[in-house]
Structure formats: structure tokens, C-alpha cells
Image (tube, grey):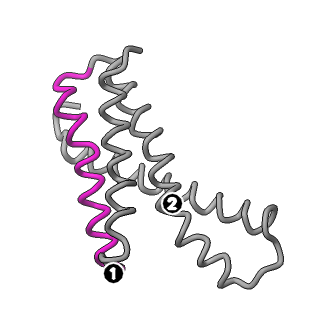
Amino acid sequence: MKKYAVLKLIGLAMLTMITLVLISFLEVAVYSYLINPGQDAAVYDAHALSSAPYISGIFGFIIFFLVVRYWKKKKYPNLTTLVFLFPLIYVLLDLIIVTAAGVRWAEFLIIFLIANGAKFLGSFLGYKLKP
């Protein structure tokens, strides 16, 4: 992981982002088919917008925890740097995408900080807790 570490972390962060989006789609599908079927599409759109940050925070925590735990188990060199850079790169990519989407930050900032804070926490705990 030492050579081209930042490029690999960008790829890993993008893969993580795609995984979280797929989990969010799956959650909305379960909600629309099993929990609250037969509603207008606007109901499901609103549900997707409100649940996506929570899905990102919860499952992001788990993914970051497991990735760092794997790195720790494999004894990657410069692990402390990777533990910090992985969520940082993810958050930077997330900032770019969310800003490009035209999100109003006044309404979104708190949940954005909580969801991405969970990723930093998952990364940190994956590093600190014993395997």
C-alpha cells in the first residue's frame, strides 16, 4: 500500500462511497416494497433523502472499522497515516459531490458532520481495539 498510497486510498474511498449508495438503494427498496408499499414516488424520494445520511453514518462506521481492522491484521506500514487519510479522503470526496449536487449546507451540515464523524470513529476504533 506504500507505493501510490493516496491514489489507492482515493479508489478505496470511491468504492466505499459506491457501496454506501448501494446499501442506501437497498434500504429504500425494502422500505418501498415491504414496509410502506403503494405510496407515491415522492414519498420514497423523501424517505431516501432523509435516511441516506443515517445509512452512510451507520454502515460507513462499520466499513471503515473493518477496513482498518484488516490493515492492522495485515500489519500495513504507516498504518497510523492510513487510518487518518482514508476517512479524510472520503470526506473530501463527499464534500465535492455534495457541494456539486447543490445541497444547502445550513440544513445539511449537522448530519454531514455526524455521518462523517462516524467514519473517523470507525477508522480510529478499528485501529485502537485489539483484534
Q: Can residue 83 be found in the magenta stretch?
A: yes
Tally the marks: 2
**Residue 109 spot, x, y in % from top left:** 32, 68
Residue at left 36%, top 20%? 129
Side of 20 relative to 101 (left or right): right
Q: Is residue 10 left or right of residue 63?
A: left
The three-letter amino acid code for the residue at tag 2 is Val
> x%, y% of residue 106?
30, 77
**In which quadrant of the rendered image does the N terminus lie?**
top left
Locate residue 48: give its quadrant.
bottom right
Q: Above or below — where is 97 with respect to 86?
A: below
Rendered residue at 38%/45% (across/down): 118
Picture disc at residue 104: 1
Percent across and percent down for residue 55 are 53, 55
Q: Which residues are magenta?
A: 76-101
Q: Is residue 69 above or below residue 15?
A: above
Q: Report whether 79 appears left or right of 37.
A: left
Looking at the rendered image, the disc whose residue lies closer to the viewer, 1 or 2, is 1
Residue drawn at point x = 40 percent, y = 33 percent: 65
Q: As shown in the figure, which amino acid type bears the numbered disc 1? A: Arg
Circle 2 residue: 21
Residues at discs 1 and 2 in contact (Cβ within 8 Å): no
